[in-house]
Image (cartoon, rainbow, N blue to C red):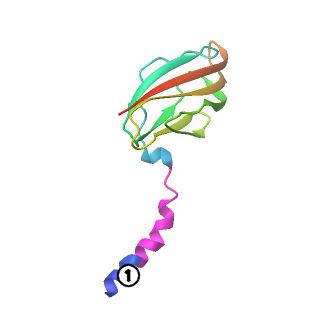
Amino acid sequence: MRYLKAYALAFIVAAPSLAFVSTAQAVSECPVAGILSTWGINSAGVFNVASGGACLFPLRIEGVIARSSILHKPEHGTLKKLNASTFVYTSKAGYVGPDTFSVQATGKGPTASGTSVITMTATVQ
């Protein structure tokens, strides 16, 4: 019984530190098909994700991102902005089918600058 109490106390003491684990460390990158263009040109892509699953969606446009935002939220999941260049998509548990979202990013690259809208379609399986 004494060991059980010690184990429970150790778990309670350690549990708060588990909340500080970064979302980025717990999720892998979305396997995106499609090409993200240069600044000022809109683009689109597709990826697969498990129902209830999550993945990182990093913006991969050459240059510097000045700012970004969620333009259109997904209907069957959530999209969270981690920083100016990375988002996390999480599909709703139990949902199977397509889900679409858009992010808007403004920046400057070696050959162009401007604002781009990136529309992504997730196939939730």
Quadrant for the C terminus in the image:
top left
Using the rendered view, name the quadrant where residue 69 is placed: top right
Q: Nearer the viewer, residue 60 or 81?
A: 81
Residue 23, x across and y down, in percent: 49, 47
Q: Residue at x 32, y 83 (%)?
A: 3
Q: Which residues are magenta?
A: 9-22
| Count of residue discs | 1
Q: Position of residue 43 (x, y in %)?
A: 54, 17
Which residue lies under the disc numbered 1? 6
| Residue drawn at 31 percent across, 87 percent down | 1
Question: Residue drawn at (45%, 69%), measured in percent from left and top?
Answer: 14
Above or below, comparing residue 109 to residue 81 in the picture: above
Q: Magenta stretch: residue 16 in it?
A: yes
In the shown orientation, is residue 40 left or right of residue 18?
right
Residue 18, horizontal then vertical, whole percent: 47, 61
Counting from the top left corner in percent of width and height, residue 72 is at 60, 29
Q: Does residue 2 appear to the left or right of 41 in the view shown?
A: left
Residue 14 forms part of the magenta stretch: yes
Q: Nearer the viewer, residue 122 or 76?
A: 76
Label 1 Cα neighbours within 10 Å, binned few <14 / some 14-19 / many ≥20: few
Q: 78 or 15, which is in the foreground?
A: 78
SS of the residue under disc 1: helix
Tag 1: amino acid: Ala
Q: Is residue 5 visible?
A: yes
Residue furthest to the bottom in view is 2
- Dominant secondary structure of the residues highlighted in magenta in the image: helix
